[in-house]
Image (cartoon, rainbow, N blue to C red):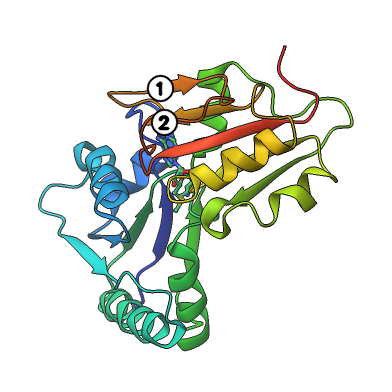
C-alpha cells in the first residue's frame, strides 16, 4: 500500500475569498479533512471556509485537545491525534489538515507535523501557505507593516505585555496575535510607552462584525473577540 500525502493547508483569515487557488485545488482532491478543534471559534471558521471546496462525501474529522497548558496532557493528546492522521495516511488516503490563516504561523498543524515526521518519516507532507491574519489586518486597516530597512515582529499576546517592552526596542512594528485575554495589560503598556494613540486593533477581519479601532488611548469598553490582533508602529501611524 502506498502511503497517502498529508497536506497542511492554510485557508486564510476569514474572508472566504482569501483562500489560495492551490488550497482549493487540493481540498477538492483529498479523501479526508482534519481540523484541530483548538477553539470552537477558529475550528468552525476554518471548516466554514473549506466546506464549499471539499470533494463530495469526504469526511471531516475534528482533532480535539483539552484547554490546558499542561505539557504532558497536551503531548499525549497530540500523539493520539497524530496517530489518527497517520492511520488514515497508511490506508493510502490523501488527507488535509486545515488551519485558519497560515499553517506555519501559530498553528496546531506544527505539532502534528513534527510528530508525524518523527513517527512516520516515510509519509510525504506538503504545506500550502495561507494568507495570515495580520496580512489581512494590515490591509483592512490600510497600515504598512514595514518598508525600506524596517523590521516587523510578530508576537503572541498570551504572555501579556511581558515581551512587548523588550521587543519594541528592537523593531519598527510589532504585531500581537491572541490579544483577547490580556488586552488590558497590553493597552496599559502601550499607554505607558506612549504608543496607544497610534496602535490599531483589528477584530474579525474579513468577517461579519469586522472592527478597526485606531486609537487605543482610552482602552476598550468590552473585551475584544478571540479573532483580534494589534498593529503597533513605533514611529506611529500618520
Ligand atoms: C492561533 S492564532 C492563528 C494564526 C493564524 N494561523 C494566522 O496565520 O494568522 C489565532 C489568532 O490569530 C488572529 N486571527 C485569526 N483570524 C483573525 C481574523 N479574521 N481577524 C483578526 N485576527 C485574527 C487572532 O489574533 C487570533 O487570536
In the image: residue 193, left or right of residue 112: right
Residue at the image position 32 percent from the left and 83 percent from the top: 83
Q: Earlier in the sequence, mark 1 or mark 2?
A: 2
Farthest-out residue, left: 57
Reading the image, the residue beneath label 1 is 211
* Depicted 45 relative to depicted 220: above or below: below
Quadrant assignment for the C terminus: top right
Q: Quadrant of residue 48?
A: top left
Q: Quadrant of ligand 1?
A: top left
* Depicted 13 relative to depicted 145: above or below: below
In the image: residue 18, left or right of residue 48: right
Farthest-out residue, right: 149
Quick one: 125 or 236, which is closer to the camera? Answer: 236
Q: Position of residue 154 (x, y in %)?
A: 65, 46
Q: Position of residue 142 (x, y in %)?
A: 59, 16
Reading the image, the residue beneath label 2 is 203
Graded by Cα atoms within 10 Å as few (under 14), some (14 to 19) or many (20 or more), the crowding at tag 2 reads many
* Depicted 134 relative to depicted 119: above or below: above
- The number of callouts visible is 2
* Depicted 189 relative to depicted 35: above or below: above
Quick one: 150 or 236, which is closer to the camera? Answer: 236
Q: Position of residue 179 (x, y in %)?
A: 49, 45
Amino acid at each position: 500500500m502506498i502511503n497517502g500525502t498529508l497536506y497542511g493547508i492554510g485557508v486564510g483569515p476569514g474572508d472566504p475569498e482569501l483562500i489560495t487557488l492551490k488550497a482549493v485545488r487540493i481540498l477538492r482532491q483529498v479523501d479526508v479533512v482534519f481540523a484541530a478543534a483548538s477553539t470552537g471559534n477558529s475550528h468552525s471558521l476554518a471548516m466554514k471556509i473549506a466546506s464549499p471546496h471539499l470533494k463530495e462525501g469526504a469526511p471531516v474529522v475534528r482533532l480535539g485537545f483539552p484547554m490546558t497548558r499542561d505539557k504532558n496532557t497536551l503531548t499525549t493528546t497530540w500523539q493520539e491525534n497524530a496517530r489518527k492522521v497517520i492511520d488514515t495516511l497508511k490506508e493510502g488516503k490523501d488527507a488535509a489538515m486545515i488551519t485558519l490563516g497560515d499553517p506555519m504561523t501559530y498553528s496546531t498543524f506544527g505539532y502534528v507535523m513534527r510528530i508525524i515526521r518523527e513517527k512516520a518519516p516515510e509519509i510525504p507532507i506538503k504545506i500550502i501557505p495561507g494568507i495570515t491574519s495580520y496580512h489581512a489586518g494590515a490591509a483592512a486597516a490600510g497600515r504598512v507593516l514595514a518598508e525600506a530597512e524596517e523590521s516587523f515582529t510578530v508576537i503572541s499576546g498570551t504572555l501579556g505585555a511581558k515581551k512587548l517592552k523588550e521587543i519594541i526596542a528592537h523593531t519598527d512594528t510589532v504585531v500581537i496575535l491572541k490579544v483577547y485575554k490580556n488586552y488590558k495589560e497590553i493597552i496599559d503598556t502601550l499607554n505607558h510607552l506612549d504608543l496607544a494613540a497610534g496602535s490599531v486593533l483589528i477584530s474579525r477581519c474579513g468577517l461579519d462584525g469586522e472592527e478597526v479601532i485606531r486609537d487605543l488611548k482610552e482602552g476598550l469598553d468590552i473585551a475584544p473577540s478571540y479573532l483580534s490582533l494589534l498593529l503597533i508602529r513605533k514611529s506611529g501611524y500618520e
